[in-house]
Amino acid sequence: MSRQFISAFLCLVALIALVRGQSQSGFISIDCGLSENSGYTDKLTGLNYTSDATLIETGVIYNISSVYSRATLAQQFLNVRSFPEGARNCYTLKPARGNTKFLIRASFMYGNYDGQGKPPSFDIILEADVWDSIEFEDESTIVTKEIIHIPQKNFVYVCLVNKGSGTPFISAIELRPLKNSTYTTESGSLSLFRRWDIGSRSSETFRYPDDIYDRIWLPNSLPNSEPINTTSDIISMNDYQGPSTVMQTAVIPTNGSNSLQLSWEPNDPKFLYYAYLYFSEFENVQANNQTREIIIYINGIDWFGPFSPLHFAANTIYGTSPILTAEKIEFSINTTESSTLPPILNAYEIYRAKEFLQLLTNQQDVEAIMNIKSKYSVKRNWQGDPCVPIAYLWQGLNCSYPEYDPPRITSLNLSSSGIAGDIAPYISTLTSIQILDLSNNNLTGPVPDFLSQLPFLTELNLKGNKLKGTIPNGLIEKQKNGLLSLSVEGNPDLCPEASCAADESNGGRDNKFVVPVVASVVSLCVLVTAMAILWSLRRRMQVAKNGSFELKNQRFSYSNVLRITNNFERVLGNGGFGTVYHGYLDGTEVAVKMLSPSSAQGYKQFQAEVELLMRVHHKNLTTLVGYCDEGTNRGLIYEFMANGNLQALLLGEEGDILSWEGRLRIAIEAAKGLEYLHSGCTPPIVHRDVKSTNILLSGKFQAKIADFGLSRTFPVEGSGTHVTTTIAGTPGYLDPEYYISNRLTEKSDVYSFGVVLLEIITSKSVIERTHERIHITQWVSFMLGKGDIESIVDPRLHEDFDINSVWKTVEIAMACVSQTSTKRPTMNQVVMELNESLAIETSRLKATGKEYESKDSIESISVNQHSELSPLAR
Ligand SMILES: *[C@@H]1O[C@H](CO)[C@@H](O)[C@H](O)[C@H]1NC(C)=O
Ligand SMILES: *[C@@H]1O[C@H](CO)[C@@H](O)[C@H](O)[C@H]1NC(C)=O
Ligand SMILES: *[C@@H]1O[C@H](CO)[C@@H](O)[C@H](O)[C@H]1NC(C)=O
Ligand SMILES: *[C@@H]1O[C@H](CO)[C@@H](O)[C@H](O)[C@H]1NC(C)=O
Ligand SMILES: *[C@@H]1O[C@H](CO)[C@@H](O)[C@H](O)[C@H]1NC(C)=O
Ligand SMILES: *[C@@H]1O[C@H](CO)[C@@H](O)[C@H](O)[C@H]1NC(C)=O
Ligand SMILES: *[C@@H]1O[C@H](CO)[C@@H](O)[C@H](O)[C@H]1NC(C)=O
Ligand SMILES: *[C@@H]1O[C@H](CO)[C@@H](O)[C@H](O)[C@H]1NC(C)=O
Ligand SMILES: *[C@@H]1O[C@H](CO)[C@@H](O)[C@H](O)[C@H]1NC(C)=O
Ligand SMILES: *[C@@H]1O[C@H](CO)[C@@H](O)[C@H](O)[C@H]1NC(C)=O
């Protein structure tokens, strides 16, 4: 034997060993109704089954009647879990990571477990759609449902639904990972219709370990056929892994006939089927001067072939699109005229395509509500997906159902639920919530500030609890602006006004805090207030005394950062190169952006940002409070911008609509920030990443430009143009000229600002989320071509604006987005022109008496002189 041959042989052996060893990995085998913490190794398959107790919270376990527990019955059927309570009861299965496609099997045998002698009928739900109906012929019928499915998430819900025809129950659930490349469809999952081992004379079924995927093959035959078999091993040639024992038997046509037929009549002519036919040659055709050439027809139409099955090897013939529908589907397995041997068939599988269209609830919301459920030990039938199917919406929740996005939780009502403890921080991640009712419970602790940052919260009921401390300013402000209905009565220890901010964490240095304190003193809180003022004054005197205070304190140690963010307790968002956390620095809210250590690009941008923001200060640029640069721990500490970014505000829902005047004010402020970078700094600075998500809004809706990580400064040159090495920026906002020429000027920012201005006018996405992906500039040009200025403006403004002001603003925006940079105005000109647009609008408001109507909070922008929430005196 040659050495090569030996090593190849050993390699093959190793490979087989590997396949065998791994084969059970990822299997989930659950015996429903087995008592908690118990398990066993199945005698037939050698697979380990475990109890379902940890996967479901409800149900009662039973043994089936001894009448039906015959010796040959698989152990999984000896006991069941039954669900007398609740309309829907759900298992949550968590397969190991790394697999995407699974065979999921649910098995049922009634066995008169409840002594009623009457099998029920009920539905089974997979994820959020009905999978199948479960019906029994009699007490001893075993019903199994199998599906090949790619779960939406990294867990799978299997639910039983009471249809009013008896109590649902279940015997076993099995989940087997499959190779991703197998059983692919054009769309939908595959529900098993038939899986037959053809030509077996015995009544033996085969599954694991014969079948490494644990498919169950039932013996069967075909009409007008006779069985043949072999004892030789048959090797599978593909990922379908037809088991050798199944492939060792086959059929050929009987006397006279020269084709094999298999057929069925779909219950519904719309059903779509997929077929998998397995072939193997038993005869040594070449040696015997024989040929077997097969052609497969479906309803007389050529489907596959001619082909010759492989000797002692299994091939699988299948289609990647469904079989054409018909009232009767008939496969005819024929041979070519030159074939000397008749056709053969060893096994086949037929599946029906099944669509699972309902999207499961947004994952962040699911995690939040699961945490809330466990924190408060909520005693309700909260199982399966919170929002879908709508018929089984969790009690106390309401959801929104966007057309193409996962459902979101919009309201949570835990009123009178006997819950205790503090207000769960998880609520802060229910970012679509509109209504929160926690009334009449035993909640303690403070009213957390995160409630004021839930952007869509319109109703907050905290009545009848034991909450302490003060109500956060943000909530009071929203209430004053008519954005929030707030109820806090019946909390004896709660200070009714925000101003009495007693706890030290709120003793900030900013004027904003002190002024309303003096303005609205409430008896009980006077003392604390006075203390807060004193403390605040003392801090300010310290600052004055020590000139270098500011500089020294801009660099923070990592342990300080941990303290500021309370060990990174609250995530505000995930940015380009790391995560942004919420924190308090000397009582003032701050945002802390931590750089992910792996990002080299990130570190460059970090340095750029620190250097730039350390020397550039303007009221329309975000303020850097400090930074941390300790080994791999690098972070930037900014002032906290309570009202998020401009894009979120523009896309916000009803109630949060920015007025036309408000939009112009924000546009002017952002323009001023850029103007300052371009002409107020020497050398000038190009921001390079101007976009609506980089324009942030303070608690008073003052606009500030953020994220200077891509900014570039240039030595002053005559030409004013600079060649950079790499193109940077955000698609949609990127100056086309810069993109082509690689020549960067301030005018690139002007282009991006023009795009932002169009967003401000239209409240549309920069790139349409449709197939055509139309850019906002193309769309506006098109509408302008039609002379249709009204439909350019955000329709939610209901034409409450001066049309001339709009015309002017659209003109400015279109000038900014000129393809050639020389045609674009400077930011200086943009600011002037926008001021004129604003003047037109304000004179209309004055004339119509709307000026002081305070329709939304935006109007506070103009009045606010103290709004610079700068924690460090400059
Ligand atoms: C099954 O369980 C037995 C006994 O607990 C254990 O020895 C065996 O390794 C398990 N098999 C697998 C494949 O996990
Ligand atoms: C079911 O039968 C097993 C074994 O016979 C027994 O140990 C168990 O207690 C029974 N369970 C119930 C719920 O009757
Ligand atoms: C499996 O297939 C799906 C779609 O067919 C694909 O999205 C996914 O990335 C694949 N997973 C692996 C691990 O190949
Ligand atoms: C194989 O065929 C022989 C007779 O030809 C029969 O006795 C035997 O039962 C068959 N084996 C199987 C597994 O069908
Ligand atoms: C084939 O066998 C069937 C019965 O098994 C019989 O009815 C039929 O006449 C036979 N056909 C021929 C062509 O011998
Ligand atoms: C296949 O064979 C059957 C039976 O011999 C015959 O009736 C049928 O016409 C054949 N199909 C085709 C498409 O040749
Ligand atoms: C196969 O055919 C070839 C030529 O066609 C012939 O020489 C040979 O003997 C045949 N073998 C058998 C086993 O019939
Ligand atoms: C849920 O929201 C919908 C739409 O806003 C509303 O019609 C429905 O009454 C709400 N249901 C509950 C239970 O609050
Ligand atoms: C919350 O539920 C209670 C009763 O369960 C009801 O009285 C109250 O109106 C609900 N709250 C809201 C905001 O719908
Ligand atoms: C609060 O807790 C007390 C004692 O545990 C209990 O008596 C009372 O009913 C609870 N109140 C509410 C509203 O749940």
Image (spheres, grey):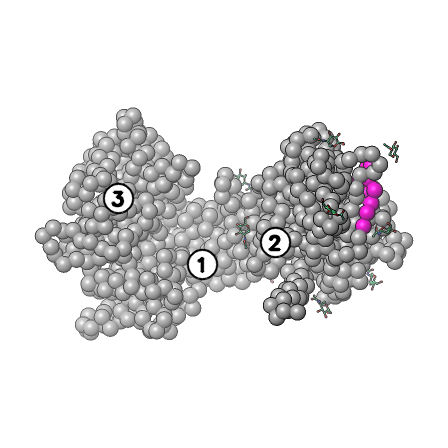
Residue 768 image position (x, y, % from top left): 38, 39
In the displayed structure image, the side of residue 530 where residue 102 appears, left or right: right
- Give the Cα distance between marks 3 and 1: 49 Å
**Mark 3–mark 2 CB contact (< 8 Å):** no
| Viewer-closest of 859 and 350 | 350
The residue sitting at 70% across, 40% down in the picture is 294
Name the mark nearer the viewer: 1 or 2. Answer: 2
Q: Quadrant of residue 623?
A: bottom left
| Viewer-closest of 82 and 209 | 209
Q: Quadrant of the N terminus?
A: bottom right
Residues in magenta, as a range: 217-229
Name the mark nearer the viewer: 3 or 2. Answer: 2
Marks 3 and 1, the one that precedes in the sequence: 1
The rendered magenta stretch, by its main secondary structure, is classed as strand
The residue sitting at 14% across, 58% down in the picture is 715
- In the displayed image of the protein, which residue is found farthest to the top? 786
Q: Which residue is mark 3?
A: 736
Q: Which residue is mark 2?
A: 179
**Residue 505 higher or lower than 852, as above or below:** below
Mark 1 residue type: Val
Residue 673 image position (x, y, % from top left): 21, 51
Q: Secondary structure at mark 1?
A: loop
Q: Which residue is mark 1?
A: 447
In the displayed structure image, the side of residue 228 where residue 527 appears, left or right: left
| Viewer-closest of 55 and 42 | 42
**Residue 99 higher or lower than 321, as above or below:** below
